[in-house]
Amino acid sequence: MNTIITIGREFGSGGREFGRRLAEELHFEYYDKEIVEAISKHTSLSEEYVQQVIESAPHPLFPITIGQSMSYTENYQMHQIQKVYQAQCEIIKDLASKSNCVIVGRCADYILRERDDVLNVFIHADMDFRLKRIKADTDKEFKDDNKVIDFINKTDKKRANYYNYYSSKKWGDSRSYDFCID
């Protein structure tokens, strides 16, 4: 049996860096963007498209009203979105079965929920910390903090929508994780 640590995180909280450093310290494998690359190869879809799908829930993009049928294009897009999620599940389960690892995001805690060897962590931070961190981590010069805060909030909302759509949990709710770290 392996030890798997999943990391959920708010945008700009440092969750990705925390996961990477934890993996290095424990000598575990680290998976983050590598999962997107693997999904892209598995599905023959572009990494950009896969990333876009993973950052959004299907239902806001493609609302379905009872009594109406989807167009061919909407049906095809929904099929592609489900294809991405199925590939994501297979890849995450496969990675978890191979070795001790840290997996960042991608509903990994939910996908691996039936395993006994998983520790689920959520990283959050106050907005001032996140704002400073994002401004320090980018080459772009930000003139309007409100635009950055808006971007942070929109990114978190997309992550929450995706997670809440596929899981029976609520993204960021402390009851959904073993540890929450500020």
Image (spheres, rainbow, N blue to C red):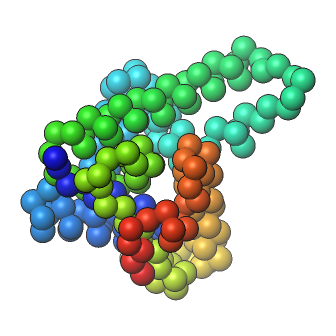
Residue 167 in the image: above or below residue 144: above
Residue with the most extreme top position: 72
**Image-based side of 96 in relation to 80, left or right:** left
The spot of residue 141 in percent (x, y) is: 48, 73
| Viewer-proximal residue among 27 and 51 | 27
| Viewer-proximal residue among 17 and 104 | 104
Q: Name the quadrant containing residue 89.
A: top left
The spot of residue 173 in percent (x, y) is: 55, 68
Question: Which quarter shows the C terminus?
Answer: bottom left
| Viewer-proximal residue among 111 and 141 | 111
Q: Name the quadrant containing residue 78.
A: top right
Disc tally is 0
Q: Name the residue: 29% across, 52% down.
A: 116
Q: Name the residue: 45% across, 49% down.
A: 110
The spot of residue 166 in percent (x, y) is: 56, 43
Q: Name the residue: 32% across, 40% down.
A: 92
**Image-based side of 59 in relation to 6, left or right:** right
Residue 181 in the image: above or below residue 20: below
**Image-based side of 94 in relation to 107, left or right:** left
Residue 178 in the image: above or below residue 43: below
| Viewer-proximal residue among 67 and 2 | 2
The spot of residue 22 in percent (x, y) is: 21, 67
Residue 11 visible: no
Residue 171 visible: yes
Q: Name the residue: 51% across, 68% down.
A: 175
Residue with the most extreme left position: 27
Residue with the most extreme bottom position: 128
